[in-house]
Image (cartoon, grey):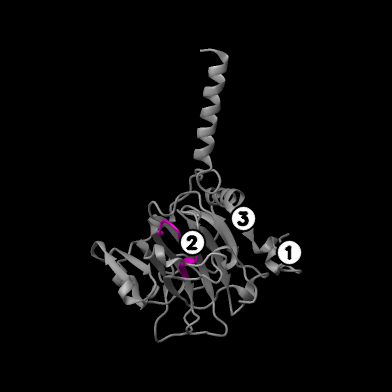
Amino acid sequence: MSILPMRSFLLVLFICSFVVAVSSRGPVYKPPPVERLTDRFAHKSVDAAFSNLYGDKNIHQLNNGSSVNIILDKSSGSGLISKNRYYYGFFSAAIKLPAGFTSGVVLAFYLSNSDIYPHNHDEIDFELLGHEKRRDWVLQTNIYGNGSVKTGREEKFYLWFDPTAESHQYSILWNNHHTVFLVDNVPVREVVHNAAIASAYPSKPMSVYATIWDASEWATHGGKYAVNYKYAPFVASLGQIEMGGCIQQKTDSTQSCSTGPSTLDPVEGQEFAKLSKQQTTGLDWARRKHMFYSYCKDTSRYKVLPAECNKA
């Protein structure tokens, strides 16, 4: 083969490789190996875990109740709420997101007690924000404690996979030591419960929610792209539901599981008190390669950064 054809061949090979690498938002990276926390907790059926919250006609159980589709169309979104309230625990769902043009659509998997404490509620959020491009769903995490909603603690990530092709696991570990957000068991964010964030750390029992809704006003590029119902219905699938935690007894609003290992609280043991070496490596990988926004770096929004951002 002459030098010129060889150069042409190598150029074509390089271009093809580049196109594959950037066909989604940036290169598709393989995450480092991590422990599978999701293997430690049993799956629950939809009926055992949730009740319908709203949009009944847009909630369809599948596979004998082991999974569920929640749907947004022009008439309504839809949502589920856990049958129990939890004071600490591990909460997870395998979620497959709608494909196609999904600007303005939000799928949320989160914990909250705003229905009980409207003025000083706690909340731990996964919010998946739709996009005008198929694979560019954005993952947003947020956390509130004691009604601290004026200080938005958002962090945003691009995913390292196509979330519309198959289901992926989104998990929250919440205990007295820290709150950890995990995607396919890879930690993407850790909020350590220390003195700096103590007043804003979630501290009261919460319900688990899964909702899909129209957030045209803010979700995609600050509301630049609204939901286009020409592409409806928007169908999200949830399965492999896990809820392992201290269940608040309905007769005891003061129940706490924050002291010592307890059969009532399966995430209070030492193995859940801090990240392992593998998990720390995974966290560093996710944040270096995939996080594109953190409130702790937003000096135009916060002239004085929240106290927890000022790490020693």
Give the quadrant of residue 231.
bottom left
Quadrant of the rendering where the C terminus is positioned: bottom right
- For label 3, the residue is 292
Q: Which element carries disc 3, helix, strand or loop? A: strand
Q: Which element carries disc 2, helix, strand or loop? A: loop
| Residue lying at 52% horizontally and 58% vertically, measured from the top left | 138
Residue 268 seen in the figure: no
Q: Which of 143 and 40 is in front in this view?
A: 143
Disc 2 versus disc 3: distance between alpha carbons? 16 Å
- Say what amino acid the circle numbered 1 marks: Thr
Query: How many residues crowd around disc 3 within 10 Å: few (fewer than 14), some, or many (20 or more)?
Result: few
* Label 1 vs 2, first from the N-terminus: 2
Q: Which of 142 and 96 is in front in this view?
A: 96
Q: Which element carries disc 1, helix, strand or loop? A: loop
| Residue lying at 69% horizontally and 60% vertically, measured from the top left | 297
- For label 1, the residue is 299
Mark 2 vs 3: CB contact within 8 A: no
Magenta segment: does it hold 104?
A: yes
Task: Name the spot of residue 164 as percent of width and height, x first.
Answer: 41, 54
Identify the magenta region: 97-110
Residue 141 seen in the figure: yes
Q: Which of marks 1 and 2 is in front?
A: 2
Residue 183 vertical placement versus 230 (above, below) = above
Query: How many residues crowd around disc 1 within 10 Å: few (fewer than 14), some, or many (20 or more)?
Result: few
Q: Where residue 130 is drawn, which disc sits there?
A: 2
